[in-house]
Amino acid sequence: MKELNPAQRDALAEVVNISFGRAVAVLARILRLHIHMSVPHVTMMPTTKLVDYIFSVLTEPKTLTLVQQSFKGELFGEAVMVLSSVSGKELVRVMSRTMPLPSLAPDKLEMEVLLEVGNILISSCLGELAKLVGMDIGFDAPEVFWHNLAPGAVRPPISASLSEALVIRIATSVEKSTIEGFLVVMLLEQTWQKLVEGIDELLAQVEPAQR
Amino acid sequence: MSYPSSACPTSPCILVVDDSRLARAMVRKALGKGWRIIEASCGPEAIEKFQAYKPWAVVMDLTMPGMNGLEAITRIKQLEPKAKIVVVTADIQEGSVRMARERGALAVLPKPLDPQKITSLLKELFS
Amino acid sequence: MSVDYEELLHVLNLGVIVVDRRGKIIFWNRWMQRHTQLEAREVIGRRLKELFPEIEAKGFDWKLENVFSLGSYAFFSQPLYDHLLPMPPGRYFGAGFEKMPQSVLIAPLREASGKVSAAAVLIHDESDSVIYRRQLEATAQRLKEISQTDYLTRLPNRRHFLERLGEELARVQREAKVLCVAIADVDHFKQINDTYGHHCGDHVLVEMAEVLVGALRPYDTVGRVGGEEFGLLLPGADWPSAKAALERVRRRVERKRFVCPEAEISRTISIGFATTEALEAPTAEELLRRADAALYRAKALGRNQVVGWEPWED
């Protein structure tokens, strides 16, 4: 994994801060809720270490719900919104109060709410990120591809070409409910290089004299 | 409107507070020429430099580790009730904007900072 | 050479509707015409929900508004919604659909300034996916059955029986109940094969399975765990009630006349059992070991009896 220098790391953290903040603001607006957001904590790691990291950080009970969405363009890879299943249920409950809900059976409704939140969170966050680093991006349909994934269960396979992962830790509270999870952004090696170049470009624009 | 000319004599100065170096650089770029920029990377440093330099205005981020932006605003307002504080933040939800205003922020602008918005705002403040 | 891109939209095997922010139809392609029997000139200028009122309950307005205000994409997934607009099925042979299953994408269309001025509602016929998915599910189900079932008696096979034992044991631990594990072995079974042939032996096993299942309760488990061996799980049975129930089973088998084409025969069974009561931390291995030891004792004592494990040998 390519190591970032302090300036690049700081820049990446700020870019994620802006993008994630934008996504949260959007969600809050359309859900008509206030979402308390602390500074999004960003870590980078090889995708091979992802699952272990997530399970080690989450509190009990450790079952997960995953919403996956592919993105294509200069920024190319997969994003996964990872929520503890408890948080997923909490989220659905909270949103049911203010979000106009379609008429679906309860279990399908839960999936649909998760898909919708995942779609908006991921496309707003990554859309803003792409804009900041000057890259283009488009999205596929989101999928709830794992529901109630437990630590011991078969892990979802991750292709070796998606080598790097950006892990954004989500710890927010909405209407007194704690929502715990992660936004994982997995990138192809080439995309990762381009992202770093985009960050360097951004740094050069604002600090022409020093870097 | 009194500007203690001893601290910022020749050109008007602005205190920019944000824990991210990139963010401070982006504000600096948006403000353009004509301002003397003083930087602080956390709440306590911001208060210290506010007292030392007595800037014309403060551009403050909300989400900082340790002392957050809201608390820093409150402290600065305690020192100088007439302090002009503008918040620049990624979190522009209605509730957050309201809280910032209640503490005494004059305006809340979203990140990434739009140069036009900040310059016209400052022009308005100092006209 | 000039290409007619509008014609391209009509040639696509995809429903293409272009709407404004209020859902008013601006464009309606031939696919839509073909599958709804509504022509473009009939629908242009009218609102989509006026023509299809049910889309409102599905949240169409809300999703459309997000597309315009956020510039994001919106989706209606087939497994959740089945379809957005009700249309007759595109597939008739081998399908059995009442309406066409669809996946729908709503994409923002921006003008030069970057502002979203219209949205494209793209409708894809998912009949093939659904048919494929159903076949896959049926095959998976079939495979599961095959891997879990004894071909002759249709009872759970050894592997499945052991799985069930594990499940029942977990429940014992969770709910602090008891469980009885028994092994029943047909007495002098080999004689049947030797005297009357293997198909008579098979026949006896099949009938034996029926007797065992019939003699126990619906939530008990009977599995074929060996050539002439049956495993029994009696959840909730303590030592005395297990003994009584298994005695009843033994008597039924004793009275039964097994009818082969060649002859009518009688057979008895020997049963050994163990319960979780006597164990601090019961494991499958220990319960099976004890049941087996008890069975051995039943055989030694003359067969055709039920013996519960006691600490005679340890």
Image (tube, rainbow, N blue to C red):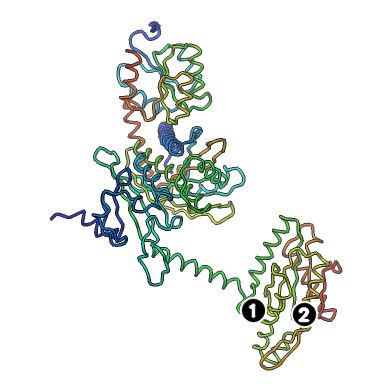
**Kind of element beneath mark 2:** helix
Q: Depth check: give the residue in front, C264 or A150.
A: C264
The secondary element bearing badge 1 is classed as: loop
Q: Residue at x 32, y 31 (%)?
A: A204
Q: Residue at x 31, y 27 (%)?
A: A208
Task: Say left or right for C234 vs A171.
Answer: right
Depth check, front residue: A40 or C261: C261
Location of the C terminus of chain C (image quadrant): bottom right
What is the three-letter code of the residue carrying label 1? Thr
Name the residue beneath numbered marker 1. C153
Q: Which residue occupies the extreme left position in the image?
A: C1
Please give the name of the residue rendered at 44% of the width and 25% of the height, measured from the top-left corner: B61
The percent position of residue A110, horizontal first and vertical second, equals: 51, 49
Q: How would you rate the neighbour count of disc 2 (Cα within 10 Å): few for under 14, some for 14-19, many for 20 or more?
A: some
Q: How many marks?
A: 2
Q: Which residue is mark 2?
A: C252
Left or right: C64 with respect to A45?
left
The answer to which of marks 1 and 2 sits earlier in the sequence is 1
| Residue A4 in sight from this viewpoint | no
Residue A150 vertical placement versus B126 (above, below): below
- Vertical placement of residue B120 versus C3, above or below: above
Residue A195 appearing in the image: yes
x and y percentages locating residue C263 in the rendered image = 70, 93
* Chain to which mark 2 belongs: C
Q: Is residue C293 above or below residue B94?
A: below
**Is C112 left or right of A83, judged from the image as shown?**
left
Q: Nearer the viewer, residue C111 or C121?
A: C121
